Amino acid sequence: MKVSYYPGCSLEGTARDYAESILGICASLDIQLEEIPDWNCCGATAAHSIDHRASIELAGRTLNLATKLPNSDMLVPCPMCFNRLKTAAWALNQDFANRYAINLQGALPRIWDLANFFATEEMLQSTAKHIKKPLEGLKVVCYYGCMANRPPEITEATDFENPQALDRIMESLGATAIPWPYKTDCCGASQVLSRPDIVSRLVGKLYDMAQRVGAQAIVVSCQMCQANLDMHQEKIGADWKRNFSLPVYYFSELIGLAHNVTGVERWLRRHITDPFTLLKQLNLWNNP
Amino acid sequence: MPQNTLTPDYHFLEQVETTGPFQASACYQCRKCTNGCPVTFAMDIYPDAVIRLVILGQRQAVLGCETIWVCAACETCSTRCPNNVKIAELMDCLKEMAVQAGVPSPQPQILALHASFLKNVKRWGRVFETIFLPEYFLRSGELLRKWQTGTWRAEMRLSWQMTRKKRFPMFPKTIKGKNEVRKILARRKQK
């Protein structure tokens, strides 16, 4: 299967672990990723906050590049990029589209949030076929964050208050996905740079609930959520006067682990909060 | 004679809605937005009040408030509004209006973050975090604040860990269509 691929800026930098795990599992599942040639930044929070027109036009430029590829599906791993591309695709089809100095130049591929793509019946079946080592004993909560689901008229999500994609993927890998109430509660995203106190409160609340429902780890599909939950765990624990020890895995890393794809160790080694001890305790880590 | 009477700006709502539609006037003050908002603890005016003040033409009050800046754009309010008021999008519109009108942000480092980010996009067409992050910390005064509060040690340790884990690439990936991106971003004057 060949699909178009929009990695987004952070997957070329701080979210290298996410990027590498996606390449790893797609190779093993025989999914060819064709990167949109010469794609640009979607503008992210910065553009939609202070330059609305640019936010649509930046994403619009990339959408036009995507129309030139023959693939009918486009995978977007970063929920922020996904959201901005979907927003532009929506806005450029409204009757006020003439506000923007860009037109869509062709039929768009279907824009997929990566987790939702891997949670289709077809992909779940093909993922299940490749399992070499089921993730038995691993109890996780799946954390979806905001942008893959909200607002639903843009994302076209139907289960936006209680999404299931990651839960389904985890169950299919043999792990236990514990239901919990904070699946789509915000982590504060880029406020981590400008108002770390806000992020500490929001993320601390997530850790607290994850522990209360008995999770050993948190599974995510967003590199911004992963960064906020993984990088500052010690500091947020100190703010909350608590000791949190919750590895934060990308769902793609856990697919890779269950499929025994080469490279899992390299991906996980890029995390800040120790991802290995738990896997060793559960006998899920065979790599030397 | 009443003191301190407020003068409404009757064109404000109309002006806001021309960049919408946000359906602000459909708000019947059920406060569902505020009840679901994860960052009300950091706000000076609650989201429902922002909408009300927009309807009442209180330009200064909304363009100068903290709320529009600390809004995390999580979209919970817009998703749950029973009247389809696009609250999060309205917050963005108000931030942009404030910037254009030269109203100083009560959260200058948040504005600095957005400005640094867009400057970075302008330079390469993509964000290069290895430059964007330190540049933001320097320009926003956040580095100074971290120095003064003593949190800089932890921050430096984290940056070092990230570097060692090769999560800060050495070189940016620039794109051929950089000039198209620059043109898009040049249409508005960034402050």
Image: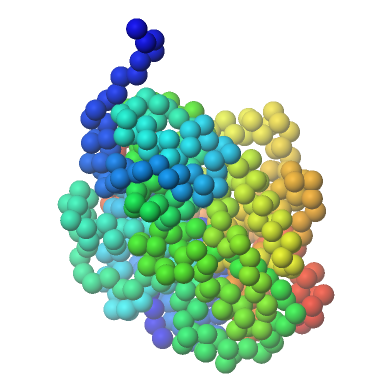
**Quarter of the rendering containing residue B25:** top left
Report the quarter where the N terminus of chain A lies.
bottom left
The chosen color scheme is rainbow
Residue at image location 51% in from the left, 31% down from the top: B44
Residue A277 in the image: x percent, y percent?
80, 69
Question: B140 or B166: nearer the eye?
Answer: B140
Residue B158 in the image: x percent, y percent?
69, 49
Q: Is residue B71 above or below residue B8?
A: below
Question: A186 or B137: nearer the eye?
Answer: A186
Residue at image location 42% in from the left, 56% down from the top: B79
Pick out the residue farthest to the right.
Answer: A281
Question: B1 or A133: nearer the eye?
Answer: B1
Q: In this rendering, does residue A287 appear at all?
A: no
Residue A143 in the image: x percent, y percent?
59, 64
Q: In this rendering, does residue A1 appear at all?
A: yes
Total label count?
A: 0
Residue at image location 36% in from the left, 43% down from the top: B28
Q: Is residue A1 above or below residue A183?
A: below
Image position of B123 (left or right of B135): left
Image position of A135 (left or right of B137): right
Q: Is residue A36 above or below residue B180?
A: below
Residue at image location 34% in from the left, 48% down from the top: B85
Image position of A172 (left or right of A59): right
Pick out the residue farthest to the front.
Answer: B1
Residue B126 in the image: x percent, y percent?
42, 54
Pick out the residue farthest to the bottom.
Answer: A129
Q: Is residue A111 above or below residue A79?
A: below
Report the quarter where the C terminus of chain A lies.
bottom right
